Every structure is written in structure tokens, then in C-alpha cells.
Image: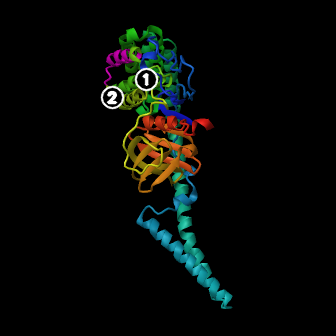
Amino acid sequence: MTFYVQKWLANGPVRFGVTPRIPLETIDDDPSLSTGPTGEFLRRRMRSFYFADTTGVGSPTMPQAKSISSTPFWASLRPTSPTGWAYIAMMILGALIILAGLSLILQGRPQGWFEIVFGVILIGIPIGVTASQRAQIKAQEDRERKEHEERDRKHREILAAYAGALDQVRRDPTDEALNRVAQERKSLELPYKVWAPAARDTVLQIGFEALGRVGMARAAEVTQLMDKVAYATGLSSDDAFDVRSQLYEVLVWHLLADDRLGQAQEAQLTQLRRAFNIWERDVPMEAKAGEQFRRLRGVTKHDLPKQQCPIKLGYGEYCIHSARGQQLKRRREGKVEKLVPVGDCTVYITNKRIAVQGKKNSDIPLSQIDDVEVDVDNDVLTMKTAGGLVFLHTEDPVFTASLIDIATTIDERPKGFA
């Protein structure tokens, strides 16, 4: 069976395999990170697979103004006011009159043509009025576009200059480069949300580079540099703090993926948190994940935990783990497919099956589980089975999924058949 964890980090989504975790005492004492100077994953152990999709540093772009030309004509007919509903009623009445007229014509009564013409007029009035309104709006947009063309051109030039200054800061964050980006920032008249993402990416990238260059022992200098760049680029204090938290998150997840989060690395991360002024409560997802991975240290199929379960067990069957959660199902909302709760449940793992007790009970033999995936951003555990996909929201998805993974390796056949 394949089991992997997926997580969205600041520099892109990652997915890595979770093999049985090695005992704590076997983890190396090398304080070096598993993260490179550009935020990339540096593999130091060759036990599992790791995939990443790096998003890179983005550039700020001008927002596209919505035009009436980009709105379908039928969408303009949607009723958004009492007048709009009156138009819809008029079109429905016109359609009914046309049908009545057709019925009269089929009966050989020529007065039906009058009803058809009258019905067409009723339908045509709302369409004509809407077309006229769209034409007026388009003409107004054309006038405004011409009036704002020069201003937009100026904004694009200033935004391009700011993007160029950010690029220079990423290459070499000298005082001169920081002064230039600060000056370009003062010229920006666009909303914060337009250019802030590129500024955040810049601060994050500089943090990775500085940390890789000076090391964890000088994390305070990295903090000062990141704050200095954040101030020059115009980031808010909240965003500057979020970027430091995102950098810390990348370091933690790379160590977890590399199975190297031991005592030496924990001490380094604690030192970094202090330098970044980050508390564990500021990174709850990493604290929770770290605890789940620690519980898995040294757990193999030969020493799986055992506990009492209220479900009926078969011959030679024993309970390994139970977890409370929710059953989920897919639901399409417009063009978006989401997972929505079905009801509360309890998941029981035995040496032979997965029992889900809730609104809808189900038993899944371990032999029918093909792979397990954990989306740690949403605490969702997905099992691909012979009967389809099973979605569960659990309180400890990584720990639960790991035990499922290990349980599938148990060979219950008699020794003579092994």
C-alpha cells in the first residue's frame, strides 16, 4: 500500500511518503537542516519519496477591470430588481401567448397570428431594453477607459519599476537596493493586495538565502534582515510575521519528510522560533503534526499498540487504534467540488479491517486498501479502496493513517503458508 502526506507550503505544495519512523536514538545529531538556500528540500536520508511543485516568486500584475463585454447577454437578463422580475414575467407571458396562438392556428383559426405577434412583442421588449442598456454601459465603459488609459499606463510603469526593484533586492539586499524599493513603493497607488504577494515572496526568499548562508546560530540576524526588507517593501507587520512563520513551517515539514526531527533538530527549531518571536501556538499545525510523528517513533508491525474496542471482533482479531471524526462525501457546488460532513463517526483499526461506525457503518478489509493520503491542511484522511474512495476527517489523521499503513503489512497467514 502507498501512504503519503500532502501539505501546501509557502513555496508550493509538497507530498512525501511516510515509512515507519526510525527510533529517536538513531536520528543523526547533525544540526543541518533539510532545507536549501532557495527553500528547496535537501534529502539527507534515502528512505521515502518526496515530490514538490515549487511556485517560485511571483510578479505583481495590474488587476483586470470587468467589462460588460465579458458578461454573457443571458446573464444580463437575470432578475436582480423588481423591474428585472417584471421583465421575466413579461417574457413568460409572451411565451404562453405564443403557444396559445400556435394552438389556434393548428385549429385553423387565423386570429392566432395576432396572438403570436403580440407574444413576440412581449418577449422582445425586455430583450430590446436589455440590449439598449448594455450598449449604454459599453459606451460609458469606452469613455471611462479612454479617460483612465493614461493613468493605467502610468500605474503599469510604476508597478514594473517596483517589480524590478524587488528583483534587485532578491539578488542583493543592500541598503541601496532597499532604498530604491522603498522609493518605488511610495509611488504605488494601487491597492495593497495587488503588490503585497510579490513582496511577501521576496522576504521569504531572502530569509531562506540568509539562513542558508549564516546558519541557525545567527538566526537573529536573519530576523533583522527579513524585517528590514519587509519594511522597505511596504509589508504590514502582520504579513511580515506571517512570512517568518511560513519559513519556519517549511523547515519543519522538510525535516518531517526526511525523518530527521530529532533532539538536535528540535533544539535548532526552538532557537529559530525564539529569534523569529514565534510561539508554538502561532504554528499549531506544525506542533500537532510533530506530536503525531513523535508517537510513531519505532512503531512497526511487530509492536503495534493494542486497545479495547466496543466493536465485535472476529477470531484472532484485535483492536489497534480508534479515532473520533466525521464521515465526508463529495458535493459539487457550481463548478467547485467540496467535501462536506455526513455525520460523526469513530474509526477502529484492527489487524484485519477498518471499521467505521457512524451514520453509515462500513467494514473495509485491509487487503482491499490500495493507498491512503492525508491532507494535513484540512485534517482529511482519504482511503482508496476496492469499493471506491472513503473520506474521513479525524483528530489525528497522520497517526491514524500511519497505523493503517503498518497494519496492511501484517501477514496473518499460518507460518507454513508464508
Nearest to viewer (mark 2 / mark 1): 1
- The reply to whether the magenta stretch includes residue 54 is no
Q: Where residue 66 sits in the image (x, y, percent)? A: 51, 46
Q: How is the image coloured?
A: rainbow
Q: Is residue 392 above or below residue 396?
A: below
**386 or 137, nearer to the observer:** 386
What is the magenta range?
A: 265-279
| Residue sitting at x 35%, y 24% | 241
Q: Earlier in the sequence, mark 2 or mark 1?
A: 1
- The quarter of the image holding the N terminus is top right
Answer whether residue 364 is visible to the viewer in this image. yes
**416 or 365, nearer to the observer:** 416
The residue singled out by tag 1 in the image is 252
Q: Where residue 378 sits in the image (x, y, percent)? A: 43, 40
The residue singled out by tag 2 in the image is 282
Q: Where residue 413 sits in the image (x, y, percent)? A: 57, 40
Q: Amino acid at mark 2?
A: Asp
Instruction: Please identify the residue farthest to the bottom as the structure is shown.
Output: 108
CA separation, marks 2 and 1?
A: 14 Å
Answer whether residue 376 is visible to the viewer in this image. no
